[in-house]
Image (spheres, rainbow, N blue to C red):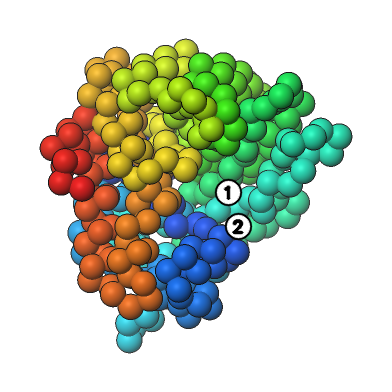
Amino acid sequence: MEALNVIAAKMVAKGKGILAADESTPTCTKRFESIGVDSTYDTRNEYRDMLFSADGLNEYISGIIMFDETLKQSTTCEQKTPFPDYLASKGILPGIKVDTGAKELAGFTNEKITEGLDGLRSRLVDYYKLGARFAKWRAVITIGDMIPSDACIYSNAHALARYASLCQENGLVPIVEPEVLMDGFHTAEDCYEVSQRTLNVVFEQLLMHHVDLKGIVLKPNMIISALGCSEQANIDRVAELTFKCLKDNVPSDVPGIAFLSGGQSSDLATSHLNKMNEKYMDKMPWNLTFSYGRALQEDALKAWSGSNREDAQQALIFRAHSNSLATKGMAADMMQKS
């Protein structure tokens, strides 16, 4: 397990975060449609190559989560280096999304269970051989009328624990991602209550399945108001509630917490992370960093528009640098330039 602990610590090293570039093909197609670009095997390969080859990315990014297709693709230059080898040569850890998506939870309305455990052990063996050194599994928890149910929380926590145990068995660090969704009309206080319930059960299940907490990375939501809530918690309140929720429910053995952006704007995701580190860094037993997808990629995607690599890479590096500073509580000045 010692090797896993070293990898986990590297993933959440101070000043660095994780780039989530693991969008499924349908999700990537929607993003490409928004900029008028056809989604094909080659255009997706070109886009990921643009992201991964940005000069200086390794100064701010410790690891990149990829989709199955991307892990098996290569750089577009003449050498055609497989992406896992290329990233490793830059000191960036290659990662892989291994769940197969959230489906309806049988017997429960408007609740979901993440699938993908069938055949996971053999897939992890193959992914390790391809160069992956960490994995990701996302569970989704919806807040609504009389939900989430205990059944939904326990079912998803159990699946996360089984996935994490299988990852560690096969030499990969598991990113454990229980996401309480922003969708709905709930308050930040509602989000706090549900997130607390969820984290408590997740860690109960992880320990029950003998998962080494020093060899995982937690990827939770921040405690924020729902998109439809009439009263949006301000940045200080989000920082306060998020820190309290984590401090009370995340064991100190966990080396780091890498937040998902969860639909927040790029600026807001950075500002929230920055405020937490600015106010509470000396009170945390774990490092607090980021594992953002759209909040890192959105500006770059628009700038790229199918061909403009240089502007897109500059946009990506600006966002990565901003979030790197936010892991130290030092992003305020940088954010004023965005």
The residue sitting at 27% across, 50% down in the picture is 320
Q: Residue at x 42, y 69 (%)?
A: 35
Q: Amino acid at mark 2?
A: Val
**CA distance separating discs 2 and 1:** 6 Å
Task: Point out residue 182 in the picture as x, y percentages from the top left corner.
Answer: 53, 34
* Label 2 CA crowd tier, 10 Å (few <14, some 14–19, many 20+): some
Determine whether label 2 and label 1 are within 8 Å by CB. Answer: yes
The local crowd at label 1, few if under 14, some if 14 to 19, many if 20 or more residues have their Cα within 10 Å, is some
Residue 234: x and y in percent read 35, 23
What residue did someone put label 1 on? 170
Left or right? Give the position of 282 relative to 293.
left
Q: On the image, numbered disc 2 is attached to which residue?
A: 125
- Can residue 10 be seen in the rendering of this structure? no
Q: How many marks?
A: 2
Q: Is residue 128 above or below residue 261?
A: below
Specify whether 108 is left or right of 96.
Answer: right
Q: Nearer the viewer, residue 158 or 325?
A: 325
Residue extending farthest bottom: 78
Q: Is residue 115 left or right of residue 64?
A: right
Vertical placement of 88 versus 177: above or below?
below
Describe the element under mark 2 as helix, strand or loop: helix
Percent x, y of residue 59: 21, 52
